Image (spheres, helix red, strand yellow):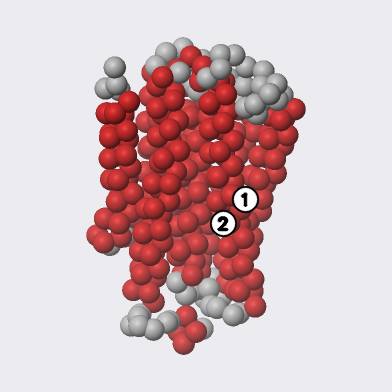
Amino acid sequence: MTDLSGALQEPWPDLRLQREAVGLGMWFFLASEVLFFAALFCSYAIYRSFNAEAFRIAAAHTKIVYGSINMVLLLTSSLTMTVALRAATIQLRRLTLLSLGATAALGVAFLVTKGLEYYADINENLVPGPGFPLKPAATAIFWGLYWIMTGVHALHLTAGIGVVIAVMTLFWRGTIPVQGSTMEGVAIYWHFVDTVWIFLYPLIYLAGRS
Amino acid sequence: MNGSSGDHETLWRGPLLAWSALLALAAISLGSAYLPLGAGNVAVNLVIAVVMAAVLAIFLMDLRNGTTLVRIVASTGLFWMIFMFVLTFSDYLSRG
């Protein structure tokens, strides 16, 4: 059953080291991703520290039901992704494919929910520019950051869904074996996108509720 | 398939525990946001977010079993992010 010939790549002597190398490479990439998102979070922190009341007023108009549903969807997708990785490591091909399918489906459900939320936001004119309904003017800063931060996060999630579907297809066709190192990188990236949402959720949806 | 039922059990148990903890923390964060704590609201929310991120990184991203090298690289992003926040805030907060 152990098909090492297809899973093991040069120059690794064993799969454990190969997986570790893929994980390490992904963590290097994620360190740069952390800084990319940190710049946005830092802007948010600066503007909020100078416009606390405006941010409170603006954040009260976010759709907390959609935000909370998406929190549950993403956390659950991290669960299925972890199961997929563990199943792949011990060569449970069917469980790997099923868990990856569930992960991609939960990701799509997140995007659909986000789409409904964006639709509701646009209907309320919550886009900075002419006709923006909130006062004072600094509320537009919050909503500008809302669109950029959730938009960039959604792009990352879309990329993640694409990768998960691509990997599923490769596993399905048997192009690459499930127990190789591929899942290691995919899983870490997916969890990172979830982590970004863990910080977006309180800053965007929970601010201004009390 | 060559996984025994024992494999299945250990495969699900850890992730399910982490997932339950994450959901519970998210619920606490949501509930706390409606309490009138003033500036304490964002503090509580962010502390919970940090704990959630830690649970995710340690148990689901498996830094628990990671090598020292992987852990160091994983913490570099955090390290440089702290510099970004400290230097940016030291500028804005010290302006006249």
**In this rendering, does residue B93 appear at all?**
yes
Viewer-proximal residue, A185 or A124? A124
Viewer-proximal residue, A14 or A133? A133
Q: Which label belongs to residue A107? A: 1
Q: CB atoms at circles 2 and 1 under 8 Å apart? A: yes
Residue at left offset 26%, top offset 22%: B94
Viewer-proximal residue, A135 or B43? A135
Nearer to us of marks 2 and 1 is: 2
Residue at left offset 33%, top offset 49%: B77
* Dot 2 and dot 1 within a common chain: yes
Hey, what amino acid is under mark 2? Answer: Gly
Image coordinates for residue B62, horizontal then vertical, percent: 38, 56
**In this rendering, does residue A208 appear at all?**
no
Characterize the local packing of mark 2: few (<14), some (14-19) or many (20 or more) Cα atoms within 10 angstroms. Answer: many
Q: Looking at the picture, does residue A201 appear above or below residue A61?
A: below
Image coordinates for residue A52, horizontal then vertical, percent: 45, 17
Characterize the local packing of mark 1: few (<14), some (14-19) or many (20 or more) Cα atoms within 10 angstroms. Answer: many
- Indicate left or right for B29 with A60 as reference: left
Residue placed furthest toward the bottom: A5
- Indicate left or right for B94 with A5 as reference: left
Q: In the structure shown, which secondary structural element does the residue marked by tag 2 occupy?
A: helix
Image coordinates for residue B52, horizontal then vertical, percent: 42, 39
Q: Looking at the picture, does residue A202 appear above or below residue B64?
A: above
Hey, what amino acid is under mark 1? Answer: Gly
Viewer-proximal residue, A46 or B5? A46
Residue bearing the label numbered 2: A160
Image coordinates for residue A6, horizontal then vertical, percent: 49, 84
